[in-house]
């Protein structure tokens, strides 16, 4: 398969690197110093699952140079999706499919609006990773996991082909019975820890161990769960408890990518995570007091970060 990894940061760099290591044809879409370092010296991944390097990397900042690829893994930040989708248009052939590996729940519909629903799968991943320096990815926590599937949940040949590629790469991959339910289960986790982590400026171990912030974490999980049910997403009744147990199992120093972006003053995924819960809660008349507190507390800084990045 010719797989394009659109965004070579912590997620794209890791999973794309594993695919390339296994011999898949991988092209990274990247930019700036990270792109230049990869072209000059390859891609290095420091991982709790074992370090590895890709000496010869195929990468470009211009997607229009590529045509008719098999698959595109979308690994940009959620706020970059519309721009990325427009840039992907030259990549699409009749058989090309696009898999968003995003933290929110709105990516499939956003991509479908620009690229056409027939090209879009649902997908997500779990990993704690980041660009440590240009050309170098650091995977510091969470067992790497990836899931994807057709939006109508039928088992298509293209989904099976991608699954086999990840299995050859040694990545734990799955085709869930219901990809939309699985995406929302991930969203339950990431929106809660990202928001609490950003507000407290503390790693998971700190805010999950104090009575007050632990209760906020629990309440945030239940708010997201209630919004999902209001939208008709049939999450299992034990989803908040299962998610809390998973959060408790993670290393205490773990931090979410949105949390790191906000702490470092960069534009973040606030709108597509806590902001999305607030908007959907308003639409379906579901109270979201903790999510609203998180969102509106962080919104002034987010607005400033967007303004500064646009200069």
Image (cartoon, rainbow, N blue to C red):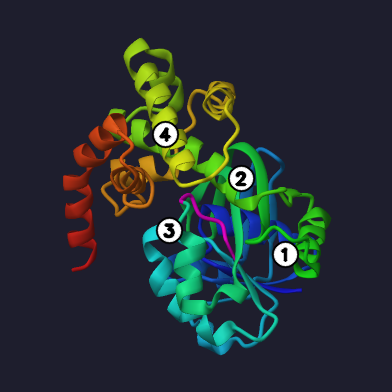
Label 1 SS: helix
Decide whether residue 156 is among the magenta residues: no
Figure label count: 4
Q: Which residue appears at 65% of the width and 86% of the height?
A: 93
**Residue at 42% from the left image edge and 58% from the top image edge:** 78
Residue that numbered label 2 is attached to: 182
Spatial CA span between label 2 and label 1? 26 Å
In this rendering, which labeled residue sits more in front, label 1 or label 4?
Answer: 4
The residue carrying pointer 4 sits among few (fewer than 14), some (14 to 19) or many (20 or more) residues within 10 Å by Cα, namely many
Q: Secondary structure at mark 4?
A: helix
Please tell me how crowded label 1 is: few (under 14), some (14-19), or many (20+) other residues with Cα within 10 Å: many
> If you read the primary sequence from the N terminus, does the residue marked by circle 1 or circle 3 appear first?
1
Which residues make up the magenta segment?
Answer: 99-104
Q: Which mark is residue 192?
A: 4
Find the distance from the CA under tag 2 to the CA under tag 3: 20 Å
Q: Nearer the viewer, residue 13 or 283?
A: 283
Q: Is residue 142 toward the left or the right of residue 105 in the image? A: right
In the rendered structure, find residue 77 and report the number of the disc placed on it. Answer: 3
Q: Nearer the viewer, mark 2 or mark 1?
A: 2
Residue that badge 1 annotates = 20
Q: Residues within 10 Å of mark 2 (few under 14, many from 20)?
A: many
Instruction: Identify the residue at image location x=76%, y=69%.
Output: 158
Q: Quadrant of the C terminus?
A: bottom left
First reached walking from the N terminus: tag 4 or tag 2: 2
Q: Position of residue 264 (x, y in %)?
A: 30, 45
Q: Is 179 situated above or below 37? A: above
Q: Is residue 61 visible?
A: no
Residue 306 falls in which quadrant of the image? Answer: bottom left
Q: Could you tell me what secondary structure mostly forms the magenta stretch?
A: loop
């Amino acid at each position: 398969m010719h797989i394009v990894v659109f965004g070579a940061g912590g997620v794209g760099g890791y999973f794309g690197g594993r695919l390339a290591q296994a011999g898949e044809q991988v092209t990274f879409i990247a930019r700036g110093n990270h792109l230049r370092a990869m072209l000059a010296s390859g891609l290095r991944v420091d991982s709790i699952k074992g370090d590895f390097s890709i000496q010869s990397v195929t990468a470009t900042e211009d997607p229009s140079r590529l045509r008719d690829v098999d698959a595109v893994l979308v690994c940009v930040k959620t706020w970059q999706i519309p721009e990325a989708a427009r840039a992907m248009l030259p990549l699409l052939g009749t058989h090309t499919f696009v898999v968003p590996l995003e933290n929110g729940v709105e990516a499939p519909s956003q991509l479908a609006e620009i690229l056409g629903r027939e090209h879009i799968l649902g997908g997500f991943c779990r990993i704690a990773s980041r660009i440590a320096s240009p050309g170098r990815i650091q995977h510091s926590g969470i067992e790497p996991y990836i899931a994807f599937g057709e939006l109508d949940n039928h088992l298509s040949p293209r989904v099976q082909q991608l699954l086999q590629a990840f299995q050859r790469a040694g990545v734990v991959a799955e085709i869930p019975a219901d990809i939309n339910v699985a995406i929302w289960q991930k969203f339950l986790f990431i929106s809660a820890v990202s928001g609490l982590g950003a507000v407290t400026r503390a790693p998971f171990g700190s805010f999950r161990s104090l009575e007050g912030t632990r209760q906020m974490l629990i309440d945030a999980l239940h708010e997201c769960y209630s919004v999902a049910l209001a939208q008709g997403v049939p999450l299992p009744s034990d989803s908040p408890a299962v998610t809390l147990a998973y959060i408790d199992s993670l290393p205490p120093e773990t931090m979410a990518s949105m949390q790191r972006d906000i702490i470092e003053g960069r534009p973040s995924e606030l709108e597509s995570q806590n902001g999305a819960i607030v908007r959907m809660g308003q639409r379906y008349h579901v109270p979201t007091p903790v999510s609203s507190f998180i969102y509106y507390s962080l919104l002034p800084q987010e607005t400033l970060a967007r303004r500064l990045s646009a200069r």
